[in-house]
């Protein structure tokens, strides 16, 4: 009798513990986005993120633009979420309240810090630090969809947070536009845990099963239009065609093994990064000079005779992409990260007349890979294997192979926006 009484006392505690341990551990997430900037796909990815918010512990939404994107563009999506919130809440009580989302929306860096890669703290960088320092056993995932300046600034100001961070960086064009901040991270925080997806993310909208309702336009018509305020808002971008290239970062953290980037999953699979991804040219270059695509190409052009530190210069790549230049009295120093395998031309503009208009170029070649880097033990990137590619996009097939799977999940979440039948 005594034994039976003890069991009765213990069983509730056992069952309570089982209930606690059976609840999935939701990942802590801060998103840094260039929503409202030069590419509207972030609006689509923000819709997807908010529809996944019941399975995440969202802690921050930071506007980190290259270009015109601002915090108000995050609030614009939250306003649509608020309209659908009653229906969403009925499906899952874990959806965060709209007011809580507005409170975590912060403005990040508006200007490039220049070649140093870091400058002054922002509301966004301070928020990353604050979130990372919260007492919590879970790591903090920082999903970077745009400029990486706010993450770099946070680590400059609070290097103690580095062990707590897990980063998924949608690179490619974002790396090209924010190469100085990237170079700061790579050089000063080489032990950072980071997935650098420069082309893998393209598998979300390139390749895979594009037949029937799974086509980029057909999916929007079949599953987004008419699915609440968020569904109609999603369909209003990109002429009703799916892009949402930042969404693989969200599906990665939602899988069972996000700490194993090499494993198969909706967010792609990756390989350890290799050395040789920073190339130095101490002179003006020609097409015979080569660098791997997505590498950091650093130039140090000796000052021509008669040029002094008082003279200024700027470099324009491909007739459209500016690079900040440091004149240290010995050389003109600047960086670039090529996003396509091709010949990249550049021209120097300067108030030193003999230099103004000087031209150069270099050739970027496709990913080749190499032995894992000892200097960057926790850095992962696109798989260069031919079988992992979709066309020219390295690693993209590791995402596109899941296309029907992740779109079915997204369709299910979009359907939550519709009111329940009476």
Image (spheres, rainbow, N blue to C red):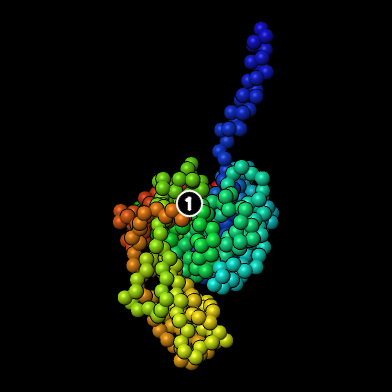
User: Where residue 133 sits: x, y (%)?
Assistant: 66, 50
User: Does residue 236 sit above or below 27 in this rendering?
Assistant: below
- Asked whether residue 6 is in view, the answer is yes
User: Does residue 284 sit above or below 133 in this rendering?
Assistant: below
Q: Please state which of residues 261 and 300 is positioned toward the viewer in this rendering.
A: 300
Instruction: State which quarter of the image contains the N terminus.
Output: top right
Residue at numbered disc 1: 378
Numbered-mark total? 1
User: Where residue 113 sits: x, y (%)?
Assistant: 59, 71
- Asked whether residue 226 is in view, the answer is no
Question: Splitting the image into 4 quarters, where does residue 274 fall?
Answer: bottom left
Residue lying at 32% horizontally and 55% vertically, measured from the top left: 385
Using a 10 Å C-alpha cutoff, classify the residue at mark 1 as few (fewer than 14 neighbours), some (14 to 19) or many (20 or more).
some
Residue lying at 40% horizontally and 46% vertically, measured from the top left: 264
Instruction: State which quarter of the image contains the C terminus.
Output: top right
Residue lying at 48% horizontally and 51% vertically, measured from the top left: 378
User: Does residue 239 sit above or below 5 in this rendering?
Assistant: below
Q: For the view shown, which residue lies furthest in the top direction?
A: 1
Q: Please state which of residues 92 and 372 is positioned toward the viewer in this rendering.
A: 372
Q: For numbered disc 1, what is the local secondary structure? A: loop
User: Where residue 220 sits: x, y (%)?
Assistant: 46, 57
User: Where residue 419 sits: x, y (%)?
Assistant: 59, 48
Asked if residue 368 lies left or right of residue 29, the reply is: left
Q: Please state which of residues 174 and 305 is positioned toward the viewer in this rendering.
A: 305
Asked if residue 419 lies left or right of residue 377, the reply is: right
């Amino acid at each position: 009798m005594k034994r039976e009484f003890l069991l009765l006392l213990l069983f509730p505690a056992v069952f309570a513990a089982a209930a606690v341990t059976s609840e999935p551990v939701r990942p802590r997430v801060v998103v840094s986005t260039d929503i409202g900037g030069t590419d509207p796909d972030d609006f689509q990815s923000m819709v997807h993120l908010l529809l996944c918010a019941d399975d995440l512990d969202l802690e921050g939404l930071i506007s980190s633009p290259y270009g015109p994107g601002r915090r108000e563009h995050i609030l614009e999506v939250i306003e649509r979420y608020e309209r659908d919130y009653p229906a969403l809440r009925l499906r899952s009580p874990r959806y965060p309240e709209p007011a809580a989302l507005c409170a975590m929306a912060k403005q990040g860096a508006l200007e490039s810090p220049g070649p140093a890669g870091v400058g002054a703290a922002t509301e966004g960088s301070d928020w990353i630090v604050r979130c990372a320092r919260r007492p919590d056993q879970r790591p903090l995932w920082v999903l970077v969809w745009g400029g990486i300046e706010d993450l770099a600034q946070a680590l400059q100001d609070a290097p103690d947070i580095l062990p707590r961070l897990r980063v998924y960086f949608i690179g490619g064009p974002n790396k090209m536009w924010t190469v100085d901040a990237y170079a700061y991270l790579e050089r000063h925080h080489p032990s950072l845990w980071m997935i650098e997806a420069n082309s893998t993310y393209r598998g979300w909208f390139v390749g895979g099963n594009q037949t029937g309702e799974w086509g980029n336009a057909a999916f929007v018509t079949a599953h987004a239009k008419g699915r609440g305020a968020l569904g109609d808002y999603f369909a209003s971008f990109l002429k009703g065609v799916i892009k949402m290239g930042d969404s693989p970062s969200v599906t990665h953290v939602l899988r069972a093994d996000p700490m194993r980037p090499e494993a198969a999953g909706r967010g792609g699979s990756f390989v350890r990064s290799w050395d040789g991804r920073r190339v130095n040219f101490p002179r003006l270059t020609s097409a015979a000079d080569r660098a791997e695509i997505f590498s950091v190409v650093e130039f140090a052009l000796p000052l021509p005779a008669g040029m002094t530190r008082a003279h200024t210069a700027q470099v324009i790549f491909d007739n459209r992409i500016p690079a900040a230049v440091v004149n240290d009295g010995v050389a003109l120093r600047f960086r670039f990260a090529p996003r396509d395998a091709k010949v990249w031309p550049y021209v120097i503009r300067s108030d030193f007349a003999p230099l103004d208009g000087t031209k150069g170029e270099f050739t970027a070649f496709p990913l080749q890979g190499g032995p894992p880097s000892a200097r960057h033990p926790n850095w992962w990137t696109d798989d260069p294997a031919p079988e992992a590619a979709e066309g020219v996009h390295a690693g993209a097939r590791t995402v596109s192979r899941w296309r029907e799977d992740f779109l079915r999940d997204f369709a299910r979440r979009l359907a939550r926006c519709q009111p329940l039948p009476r």
